[in-house]
Image (cartoon, helix red, strand yellow):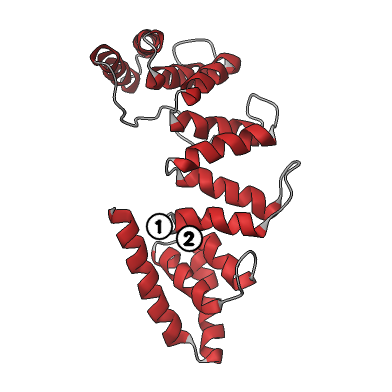
Amino acid sequence: MTKLFLSLAILFFSGIAMADINSGIEAYNEGNYSVALSEFENASQAGDAFGHHLLASLYYQGHGVEKNISKAVALFERAASEGYAPSHANLGLMYHSGDGVELNSEKALFHYSEAAKTGDFQSSFNLGQIFRKGWHDVAPSYEKAASYYRFGAGYGHVPSVNEYGLMFAQGQGVPNDFVESYAWMQYASERGDPSAVKNLDQLVEILESQGKLQQAISRAAAVNAQIASNSAE
């Protein structure tokens, strides 16, 4: 799994549940999983969504308790049904990869989408990957892929920025536009994305041959400003 299951996102909790969760997290970080289990169980039994999520994480990892994916899924589902986005993200990953559950495109897309609605850019990126290439019984759709990449790209999520830039270079789901491709690829390249660095070199050659490199540099400055503005909101 590529997502950290022991999420430390901050929500509003009852004082008792929050005290249990804080004590549990402290114990977890110290490797005292039996105490973490007890505290997370208390929070979960109090009806706290974060508590469900953390308890699910212990069952998923087998920390302080015998590993039980079925129980983990049930707890993640419970937290997700109460609107806890990291549980949606984890369930999306599990149903996407078949990690302890059967591959299920409907559930993967649903949970990724719910997580993406809350600003989880990795989940929106995963949706972009699914629709760009097609997966399981999901047909490819470059338009949908570009839309999902655009969401994360607008906030500087580097993998999304790189893929969004590639879509313009290839004319997939968006117009074929090397100036626009450069503008996004430059952002990812400056942040060390190796694919973007390589692709940017190729774009420079194309744009120089077309006499459009300065136009692309100006557009890149605008994209950087746009991302900075979005991220500051």
Residue 171 at what x, y percent from top left?
A: 64, 71
> How many residues crowd mark 2 within 10 Å: few (<14), some (14–19), many (20+)?
many
Task: Name the residue carrying label 1.
Answer: 156
Looking at the picture, tell me which residue is in the foreground, 83 or 77: 83
- Say what secondary structure mark 2 lies in: helix
| Disc 1 residue type (three-letter) | Gly
Q: Is residue 166 visible?
A: yes
| Disc 2 residue type (three-letter) | Val
Q: Which quadrant, please, contains the N terminus?
A: top right
In the displayed structure image, the side of residue 69 where residue 26 appears, left or right: left
Q: Which mark is residue 1?
A: none
Residue sitting at x 65%, y 48%: 130
* Above-or-below relation of 212 to 59: below
Residue sitting at x 53%, y 18%: 72
Q: Which mark is residue 161?
A: 2
The residues tagged by marks 1 and 2 sit, at their Cα atoms, a distance apart of 7 Å
- Say what secondary structure mark 1 lies in: loop
Residue 222 at what x, y percent from top left?
A: 36, 73
Q: Quadrant of residue 190?
A: bottom left
